[in-house]
Image (tube, grey):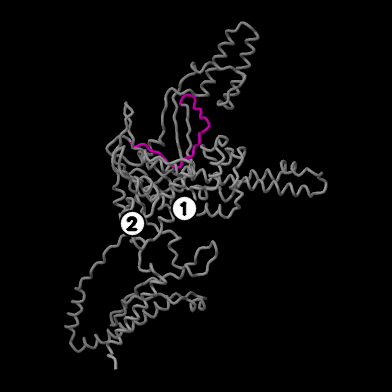
Amino acid sequence: MPDKSLTVATYAAGASLAAITLIYVFGPTYFLDPQKKGVVGLSNPANDCFINSVLQALAGLGDLRLYLIRETHRRSLDDSWVYAQAVPAGAWDAASGARDGLHGHRNVPEWKVEGLQRGLVTRGLKEILDSLNERPIYKKTISAAPFVRTLEQAFQQRISRQQQDAQEFLQVVAERLCDEYHAGRRARMFARRKTTLADVGTASSNMPGYPPGSAGLVADGGAVARDEDNKPEKEDDGVENGFPLEGKFESQIECLTCGFKPRPTESTFCTLNLNVPRASSTTLNACFDGMFKTEYIDDFKCEKCRLVHALAFFEAEAEKATSESFRTKARTSIAKLQVAIDADPETPPEDVTLPDTRYAPKRRIARHIRLTRFPNIIAIHLSRSIYDASNLSQKNSAKVAFPERLSLGGLLQQRKYKLLGLVTHKGNHHSGHYESFRRQNIYPPFSNPHTFQASGVYSKTASPASTPQVKALQQRSEGSSSPLASTPDLPSLERPGSTSTFRDRDADTNSLRSVAASARSTLSKITSRSSSRAGSSGPATAREDSGSAKAIPIPAKPKKRKSHDRWWRISDEKVKEASTRDVLSMQREVYLLFYELDKEHI
């Protein structure tokens, strides 16, 4: 007969092995915390730290990843012919929302336009960021070479490794992504217009009363086609659905002599370049003031002041004129100049010869710059280059204090941003090493604890019943000797009129109630035994026991680091944890900052 202890040990070992097998098969990452096991690193075979640092910082931007997913999914859903053929140059007008670099589409080669429409860099960046956001169960390192080859294929030239500037690499990638977004948007609008024109032409050819061959005329001049051409694309309009790094700022000048304000000049940006002042220490707000504060410029020739000067010149000439024809011509010019001054000083009359610009008066103007469209992600470049008289450059090593929460805009249109990543540089202006910091955020694609619940295609997963809050009961009267007076009680989850729904609760709530009931019964048995013993031993012993129980110190629980206080410090393939304090202390090395819009405070 086998030994009983050996049989029990055999069964225990088999059960343990079965449990380990089940966990390994159905939940291999069950006991792994994704915020503690690290992230994927990038290899550095050829001084590619400027590429690796930027890619790691972009991998921590949730809005950018959502944009890449949406844009690649949209291109895969559309027909291939929408993006295969380059849009004609006439369709690339300024009204379609193009960036400044693409307004001259007539000079852009056709292969580049087709590459922009297909979104080569958008797809390549999505693939590399998806790989960097994996949850590795061991140390893992990949290479950025596939994305570099995608960039070289898109521009049809090799990326220079001589400069090795992270800001230049970020600017190239961001502007290319922005151009691809606008190129794809124009391609969709142009395809929609072609489809509408074809539908109108087909319908008009079948209508009674239209002569044969008039389909093209109706399609070209139909009201439906014009309305469809002027109708904005709803899914692409707006800041949230556009390119998240694209913003706009407006430059406005004002003449301090006549008060004339020309039309403001609007420009788009993907990265904000802020100059670091030459000081031992400064702040990020001071760098913003250097760009957005009011700037006063001397020796500026105002358009309105020039017309006023010309008006005074013609009036003097008319008074000195001896010929009636010359006096009449001068008065005609004076009348036209007066109309231009009152209506639009920026467009002087064409048939009036103005005096030479050398004799125009010089004025002092004020220049204002303000943000008109706030991007979802604002990328800030702190320019640390200093050039002397001999054009030799050196690095400005001033400390720049930057906040975790950044506020931009005025009182009526204030936006709040949260720091998600930064790139630091150690070394001088000609050599050094780049590192990146990224906040440990877990976004919905990787945090879905209710995967197996029924939900719609685009609907959010329904949240289960919340865990009941533990509340303490009120103290009973002194005559009550039951120790359950201070025992926490679980409130009932039953609502009035919802008896059937309460019965259908999940097993978690029932298990909580069963645990609470068993705890109460155990406490009641213990208290009954202790009360019987206390009665036999006398009141003095009970007092001593209660006093000794009160004197027992309760050990304090160790403080856990908050999830939003966790960061990754990434140097190529080396990854280690950091805190917000460590990030904010990188004041002398900070080079690039990435802030994401806090949509709760909009």
The kind of secondary structure element at disc 2 is strand
**Residue under label 1:** 126
Asked whether, in this view, residue 496 is left or right of residue 583, the answer is right
The kind of secondary structure element at disc 1 is helix
Q: Give the range drawn in magenta.
A: 256-276
Q: In this rendering, is residue 15 above or below 579?
A: below
| Observer-nearest of 569 and 406 | 569
Residue 584 is at least partly visible in this image: yes
Residue at 37% x, 48% y: name it: 52
Type of amino acid under label 2: Arg
Q: Which of marks 2 and 1 is in front?
A: 1
Work out whether mark 2 precedes mark 1 in sequence or the reverse, and give the earlier one: 1
CA gap, disc 2 and disc 1? 24 Å
Residue 418 is at least partly visible in this image: no
What numbered label is drawn on residue 139? none
Residue 433 position in % (x across, y down): 31, 44
* Quadrant that contains the N terminus: bottom left
Residue at 62% x, 19% y: name it: 351
Q: Does the magenta stretch include residue 430?
A: no
| Observer-nearest of 70 and 526 | 70
The quadrant holding residue 391 is: top left
Residue at 50% x, 50% y: name it: 240
Residue 452 position in % (x across, y down): 48, 70
Asked whether, in this view, residue 155 is left or right of residue 528, the answer is right
Q: Is residue 265 magenta?
A: yes
Residue 564 position in % (x across, y down): 36, 57
**Residue under label 2:** 566
Instruction: Say few, some or many: other residues with alpha carbon within 10 Å of mark 1 (under 14 / 14 to 19 / 20 or more).
Output: many
Residue 414 position in % (x across, y down): 44, 46
Residue at 61% x, 13% y: name it: 330
Type of amino acid under label 1: Lys
Q: Which residue lies furthest to the right in this view?
A: 209
